[in-house]
Image (cartoon, coloured by chain):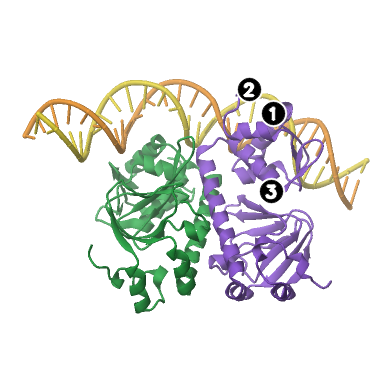
Chain colours: A green, B purple, C yellow, D orange
Amino acid sequence: MASLDRSLIAGLSVFEGIAAADLDRIVGQARSIRIAKDQPVFEQEQDAHSFFLLLDGHVRVVKSTPDGHEVIVRYISPGELMGIAHALGRTTYPASAIAVVDCVVLAWPGQLWSTFAANFPSFSANTYKTVGTRLQDAHARVIEMSTEQVEQRIAHALLKLIKQSGRKTEEGILIDFPISRQDVAEMTGTTLHTVSRLLSAWEDQGLVKSGRQRVIVVEPHRLLVVAEGRAAKS
Amino acid sequence: MASLDRSLIAGLSVFEGIAAADLDRIVGQARSIRIAKDQPVFEQEQDAHSFFLLLDGHVRVVKSTPDGHEVIVRYISPGELMGIAHALGRTTYPASAIAVVDCVVLAWPGQLWSTFAANFPSFSANTYKTVGTRLQDAHARVIEMSTEQVEQRIAHALLKLIKQSGRKTEEGILIDFPISRQDVAEMTGTTLHTVSRLLSAWEDQGLVKSGRQRVIVVEPHRLLVVAEGRAAKS
DNA sequence: CGGCCTTTTGACCATGGTCAATGAAGGTGG
DNA sequence: CCACCTTCATTGACCATGGTCAAAAGGCCG
């Protein structure tokens, strides 16, 4: 294994305000793992043996219901923590995490969580802020699902995705990882058919361009108009 | 104001494992406030000047959207903290809290949050566990809204309510505070009409009894069958 | 008693889900 | 390099769920 370096994590908001020597010690206790595309980082209900930091790639966090439905909870971008069941007082992972592309993660054994939290106040402050943000995201999503039409929800989902993982191209803003109609459906509580129909319609109107596991938002501003529910009904 | 006593908060899970003398000091810094029915404890977007503990009554936490929709985030029962924006790293309340009946709350100034968190490790551990639980509740709700029919969601909502605030009567389990069809609709992302129709149907089947701002679950077990989606379609 | 709020119920209809079939893109092995 | 196969996307037809609109009745309070 290549030797790990504190430069991997210096500058990340989770570790901000922590001394260089401490960063070295933190990184020293991590294992670096390569996860191939479509392979799990951890799985729902599994014992939460580790927590993770995504260094490179994109990860999809999915919750499955007993009756076989899957819901995408969120996508993780580089620099974010995941599998932080410990911060929620859990001993098992509440969801599964799947590599959307080949990924590199750092993994720490779960029992280090309390050590880090105790020794690095800014670490615990930052992670709890993360949990707080995720709580607010989840509430925002409940509200969207309660009050918005499918069309608006899908538009919001795309806007969130380009905000989090958009890459500018000359055609527009590309969502920088493979994402299928089915994936968008699982983020918005609808079906791949409806997503497909809407993307086709939007493509006709020049709002987006899309292809196999690829979405480019051409006109974010007009998409925002749709998301806010003030769009002409064609 | 009547003098406050640590017996008010001893035994609550948030304060468990804290010495009697500390409890006295904690209670000593609180103000006790009586909130009349339908009055706000705090309001969305307001500066988060205080955090609260509900001593008696029931409080409805509501988020309003810019376009006038309201969504009920949760109901608070006695012994629970609320208005803990500080734990989420916020300076304003993310939602409003309305007294559903006459209530009594303890209020602490917001700047004490960090003091409590620093001096009483079990306080901060317990509150973060609370935040973790709420995050999981929110995710559970997203999943319900994505995968379940209205009928199931309403059944689940009623089951949660009787679990949290049910009082046994000879007719069945009563939800122990006034709750309208509209309220149930705002918990489940539907309309009061649909809730009314379903409650009427369930009343005919002997599952529930209901009246003006009153719901009694007569047969929790059969309601659970409905909630899980394995009910005869009449 | 009068007025207001909550609930009920009916009729109608739109959104979006279900079912089904076809087509395009990419990957793999011969 | 081509043939085949799998996965993903498209599109049409149909229809059920549940939202909208409307009207009326019941309960509660001043």
Placement of the C terminus of chain A among the 4 image quadrants: top left
Whether residue A97 appears in this view of the structure is: yes
Give coordinates of residue A194: x percent, y percent. 41, 36
Q: Is residue B111 left or right of residue A106?
A: right
Residue nearer the viewer, B1 or A109: A109
Q: CA distance from mark 3 to mark 2?
A: 29 Å
Chain at numbered mark 1? B
Q: Earlier in the sequence, mark 3 or mark 2?
A: 3
Q: Is residue B1 left or right of residue A106?
A: right
Question: Which label number is shown at residue B234?
Answer: 2
Q: CA distance from mark 1 to mark 3?
A: 24 Å
User: What residue is pinned by disc 3?
Assistant: B164
Residue nearer the viewer, A155 or A120: A120
Give coordinates of residue A153: x percent, y percent. 46, 46
Q: Quadrant of residue B15?
A: bottom right
* Label 1 crowd bin: few (<14), some (14–19), many (20+), radius 10 Å: some
Q: Quadrant of residue B24?
A: bottom right
Give coordinates of residue A30: x percent, y percent. 34, 64
